[in-house]
Amino acid sequence: MITLKFLATWLKITGLAVLAFVIQAVVPIASLWHGIAAGAIALTYFGLTVALWREWTAFRRGDGGYSYQYIRYTSDE
């Protein structure tokens, strides 16, 4: 289930990044500002993608997304 949530979130972020690139390309400004805006969009996109990937792999390894767990599993011994 975490994989589907990861993919859904990643697709939303990708869609917003594509939309931001399209808006940035349509707005008539100097080419220097187009480069700066495109760089900022790309850095934000890749940063969010890496953060999502790290959280997903940590969850798959069993580490969870946080440094502690709310639920403690005990055995009846």
Image (cartoon, helix red, strand yellow):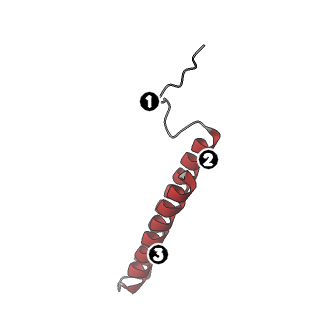
Q: Considering the numbered disc 3 on the image, is that residue within a helix, a strand or a loop?
A: helix
> Horizontal and vertical percent for residue 47?
51, 56
User: How many residues crowd mark 3 within 10 Å: few (<14), some (14–19), many (20+)?
Assistant: some
Question: How far, Cα to Cα, is label 2 from label 3?
Answer: 25 Å
| Cα separation between marks 3 and 1 | 37 Å
**CA gap, disc 2 and disc 1:** 19 Å
Give the amino acid type for the residue marked by disc 2 in the picture. Thr
Q: Does the image show residue 20? A: yes
Image location of residue 37, percent across then percent down: 42, 71
**Residue type, label 1:** Tyr
Image side of residue 36 versus residue 61, left or right = left
**Residue 7: which disc?**
none
Q: Height in image: 50 above or below 32?
A: above
- Crowding at dot 2, Cα within 10 Å, few <14 / some 14-19 / many 20+, comes out as some
Which residue position is annotated with label 3? 18
Q: Which of the pair 42/57 is nearer the observer?
A: 57
Label 2 belongs to which residue?
57
8 or 67: nearer the viewer: 8
Q: Tell me if residue 40 comes above or below residue 5 in the rendering.
A: below
Identify residue type, mark 3. Answer: Val
Q: Is residue 58 above or below residue 73?
A: below
- Which residue has dot 1 on it? 70
Few, some or many residues within 10 Å of mark 1 (<14, 14–19, 20+)? few
Q: Looking at the rendering, in which quadrant would you find the C terminus? A: top right
Q: Secondary structure at mark 1?
A: loop
Q: Nearer the viewer, mark 2 or mark 3?
A: 2
From the top left corner, tell me how far across and down residue 28 is, in percent.
35, 86
Q: Can residue 43 be seen in this snapshot? A: no
Direction from residue 50 to residue 32 in the image, left or right: left
